[in-house]
Image (cartoon, rainbow, N blue to C red):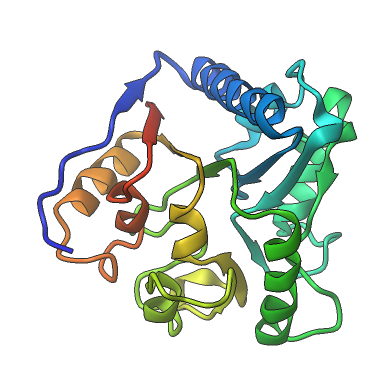
Amino acid sequence: MTAGVDSPPVTAFPDRDLLAAGLAERVARDLAAAIDARGRATLAVPGGETPGRFLRALAQADIAWMRVRVTLTDERWVPPEDARSNARLVRANLLHGPAAAAEFVPLYAPGLSPETGAERQSRELDERMLPLDVCVLGMGADGHTASLFPGAEQLQEALDPACLQSLVAVHAPGAGEPRVSLSAPVLCGAGQVYLLIQGTEKRAALDAALTATSALEAPVRVVLTRAGPVEVVYAD
């Protein structure tokens, strides 16, 4: 990739509550459209602290949740009862109320290594989730998205447009524990991508990613420069 690509549309909200509501409205609209078109919809959401408000707002959306399958953009390789589990966060914030009727497809596979688990869960995703109708991503101040961290051992493989696995194991200095992440072909193949960022540090990281020399330097670039629609939603 060359540097200096055009910025995708950025929608700024006055505060984080309005951001959560606005993003939830957009995602619910997209899921409803997919259900109307094909009778089902698939959604990938991020973990971490940032998306909590958005997930709680989306949980109340009046759509046919029994026709929606939900997965994660990435996962720490920890059991679902662990405090750092993204699956635990999604169950606590999204899969209740109307959204309790949705089907959740986890990324963690108990008893397996991240590498073996990623290979097995890739097949599950291929059969039941892909292509994604909607993918909501977060971004770190270092330009990572999902668990595609700068300097990760498997980053070049995960960013390769010809990557054969939908889910890849990730070992990176900034990741804490081993993780798994959706690969670039899956992220870029979603019908609609939203990038959720909050705070001036993340906005500066977005600007830096747009002028980075490659996605190896700022992995979020891989979705910012994809051919399909991307919308950045932002609040201070």
Q: Is residue 203 visible?
A: yes
Position above or below: 234 against 14: below
- Compared with 82, 25 (above or below) is above
Relative depth, front residue between 139 and 121: 121
- The residue depicted at 55 percent of the width and 39 percent of the height is 50
Look at the image and tell me in which quarter the N terminus lies: bottom left
Labels in figure, total = 0
Location of residue 199 in the rendering, given as x and y in whole percent from the top left corner: 37, 34
Q: Nearer the viewer, residue 126 or 88?
A: 126
Q: Is residue 53 left or right of residue 104?
A: left
Q: Is residue 23 left or right of residue 221?
A: right
- Asked whether residue 77 is in view, the answer is no
| Identity of the residue drawn at 45% across and 82% down | 154
Q: Position of residue 56 (x, y in %)?
A: 71, 27
- Left or right of residue 232, residue 88 in this image: right
Where is residue 231, by image quadrant? top left
Above or below, 103 relative to 15: below
Location of residue 199 with respect to 177 vertically, above or below? above
Which quadrant is home to the C terminus?
top left
Residue at horizontal 34 percent and vertical 20 percent from the top = 12
Given residues 25 and 113, the one toward you in this image is: 25
